[in-house]
Image: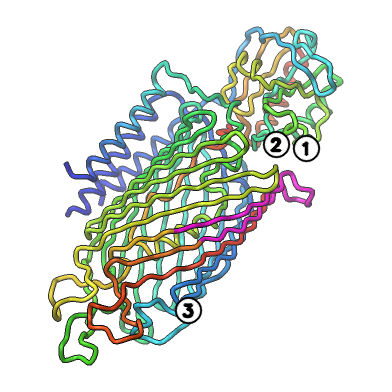
Amino acid sequence: MNPFKAVMASAIVILMTVGAAGCSDIKPWVKPYERDKLADPVMSLSRHGKADSYMHHVYQARESARGAEGGSGGGCGCN
Amino acid sequence: MAVTDRAGFLSALVTGLVGWLLLSQLATAATLPVDNVDVLYHRYEGGGMVIDGPSVLVRKSVGPQVSVSGQYYVDMVSAASVDVVALASEYTEERTEYTLGVDYLHEDSILSLGYTNSSENDYEANTVYFSASQEFFGGMSTVTLGYARGQDEVGVRGDESFSEDADRQNYQLGLSQVMTRNSLLGVDLEVVTDEGYLQNPYRRNRYIDPDAQRGFSYQLERYPETRTSFSVATRALYYLPYRASIRGEFRYFSDSWGIDAQTFELAYVHALNPRWTLEGRARYYVQDEADFYSDLYAFENSQTHLARDKEMSAFSGTTLGGGVVYEWKQTSLPGIQRLQASLLVDWLDFSYDNFRDVTASGDFLPGQEPLYSFDAFVTRASLILEY
Amino acid sequence: MTTRFLGLALTLATLVGVSSVQAEEMNIPAPDFTLESRHGENLRLQDFRGEVVMLNFWASWCGPCRQEMPLMDDLYAQYKDLGFTILAVNVDENRDEAHRFLDKVPVSYPILYDPQSDVSEQYEVQAMPTTVMIDRDGNARFLHHGYQPGYEDEYETQIRQLVRE
């Protein structure tokens, strides 16, 4: 199978599993009031703001690989 | 043909996924990024080059649902990299970039729209970016979709008549999942397609030429007019009980030019006390060369596509970095709710497996020159003020 | 070309179309509990019968909580003489974090500590912050998930309604 399509298929499976979990009886096991550690800045995926995106740019200008650098989520999950 | 096929496939897939997910349990709401000013001094020094400059970002919310941001960024380049130095003299150059963005919070999703213009005397790039981010499953999962469209104009200093276009499209899909009270997992996928003039007009490649003084001569580069790349990355973050964290990342990259690359990264963050944090990181990058790459071709015009850009060669890069972050929450400064100052330093070490240094002193037969390698220091000094 | 843009347009439409509930109306007895307060003594919910109680769950690490607290303080000052009080339940595991926070965001309404999340679990808190409006008979009448600028107007409307009952 084409490696592109293989990874796409895996992505579908992962995301559908997560989605299915939302539909079924599985309740979120980390409660909103239990997010203190995740809200801590040491657990941030991108704590340094623009300094982090600058570093991606440094690598992109010198390496052929590009993409899949970002990430958002985690944190306090408020509202 | 393959380009449109994959892109269409990804869009359809992504639409189907999101539609499916949204049929499931009611999503929870999210929060907009906080109002802040982000000032950065960045500096890259190595390989005979110094590139430094400022970056200033201002973000402000307009009402409860909208947040706007504007960024000004400058790269001031002095000196030149090795493959241009071999043929041209030193130069200074400046690249200026402006970005405008707006984020819109609607119930449970955040929609973002952005525009970036990057301008230097021989390259103009315009990019439009759109993304949608949604939290669900009790706020434990976040799905993000992104699409970017770029249109670039490639020019040549000193040649007014030269103007070529390069277009680019990025498709992004990201999932962030809270695993436990102490851990987080993220998966990102991105497909990039380029079309147009994708080479560097200043670069030349070389071929064996017995008549030439050095034994080789230069000729123009000739890249394919399309490129499709795919990358998938996974990252995991774990909280350590003494207010620290460890992060691991792996990214796999593959493109239609035959380049395969892997990136490994490990980072450790350690809070000394509520205000001061130390961090360290290590990164290893390895790639193999493009199908049409060669440091030295056997003769002139030997194949359809020709490239000697070291970025297309087989090489590896190691980075070791560290930093210190100072955070002041609920400051006594008027109007400032949080202050964060960071100083981050990284040492990058690149070593090439099949790109040779033609500027190396000494008498070498073509193709016998030492393999090129260089290292660089990257410094980032940043100040973030939340107001 | 059209496939791409159509796909993205559909995505946008589905995302915008989904709505979620931030404020609910109900009339069920609010579960009783006893928690230690900032001033040292234990406070029991049942002791507040006859008063309108705004029960708020907050944490020092929660951004929207920080936004709404000064506004809640205004409501407290305005309506406390009409038989209204706020009970703000802090869910920080570490009390010091809450104290550091309150030093910078001072409020005059009662603060209760729920470090083991017993009451949070009892009330099945689904978002941070969460606000429950309890009437004079001890029944939970309105439930708010999260905080966004503008919610304080809803709080005020509901307080005025419950105070008049």
Quarter of the figure that contains the N terminus of chain B: bottom left
Hey, what amino acid is under mark 3? Glu
In which image quadrant can residue C141 be found?
top right
| Disc 1 crowd, CA 10 A, few/some/many (<14, 14-19, 20+) | few
Of all chains, the one bearing label 1 is C
The residue segment tinted magenta is B319-346
Residue B345 among magenta residues: yes
Q: In the rendering, which numbered label is found on residue B93?
A: 3
The residue tagged 2 is C66
Tell me whether marks 1 and 2 sit on the same chain. yes
Tell us which disc is closer to us: 2 or 3: 3
- Observer-nearest residue: B371 or C160? B371
Q: Amino acid at mark 1?
A: Val
Identify the residue at horizontal 22%, vertical 68% (top origin).
B293
Residue B71 percent across, percent down from the top left: 55, 61
Subunit that carries the residue with mark 3: B
Q: Which residue is mark 1?
A: C105
